[in-house]
Image: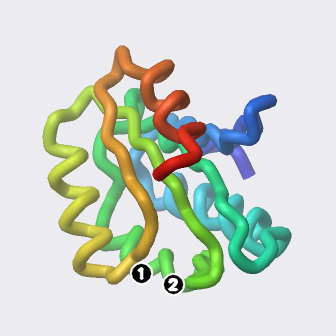
Amino acid sequence: MGEHVQLYVLESGIHHFVWFNNSRDAVYDQSAYYKDINARLSHGETILLLIDLRQAGAPPFRVLSDVIGKSGMRNDVNYRTAYLSDDNIVPILMKNFVVANRISGNRGFFKSDEEDEAKMWLLETDQ
């Protein structure tokens, strides 16, 4: 794992995924990380995810859609996800993607220079 997407677990507990490209292999890298993380989560637990697409741009949504069900996403876990992107179309595409694939969770979308804001949003407990 880690050639196309790298995971950094921050001291705050945020799982920071940095995408280096928007390839099919990047989707498989992230999926492998998700499988590992999801296997260790407890019922009702909240996981904080920071998806950094600044280098990669929009992921390949068709591949993402095919892989998402196999990544071990769970209905009994709360996914709180912030996306960082330089591309203005990414928030629109991601919102449509999660609705079309019936993926639950709390999501925020942030511009490239808003990493600190994204982390603060993830750590808010009243969301």
Q: Amino acid at mark 2?
A: Gly
Q: Secondary structure at mark 2?
A: loop
Q: Position of residue 109 (x, y in %)?
A: 31, 41
Which quadrant of the figure has residue 124? top right
Q: Amino acid at mark 1?
A: Asp
Q: Position of residue 112 (x, y in %)?
A: 34, 22
Q: Secondary structure at mark 1?
A: helix
| Residue located 51% across and 48% down the image | 126
Give the vertical position of 96 relative to 18 (above or below).
below
In the image, taking residue 44 as reference, residue 86 lies left or right, namely left
| Residue located 49% across and 77% down the image | 67
In the image, taking residue 103 as reference, residue 93 lies left or right, namely left
| Residue located 66% across and 64% down the image | 34
Residue identifier under label 1:
66
Give the vertical position of 126 relative to 69 (above or below).
above
Residue identifier under label 2:
69
Residue 56, numbered circle? none
Query: What is the crowding at mark 2: few (fewer than 14 residues within 10 Å), some, or many (at least 20)?
Result: few
Most distant residue in the front direction: 126
Which quadrant of the figure has residue 75? bottom right
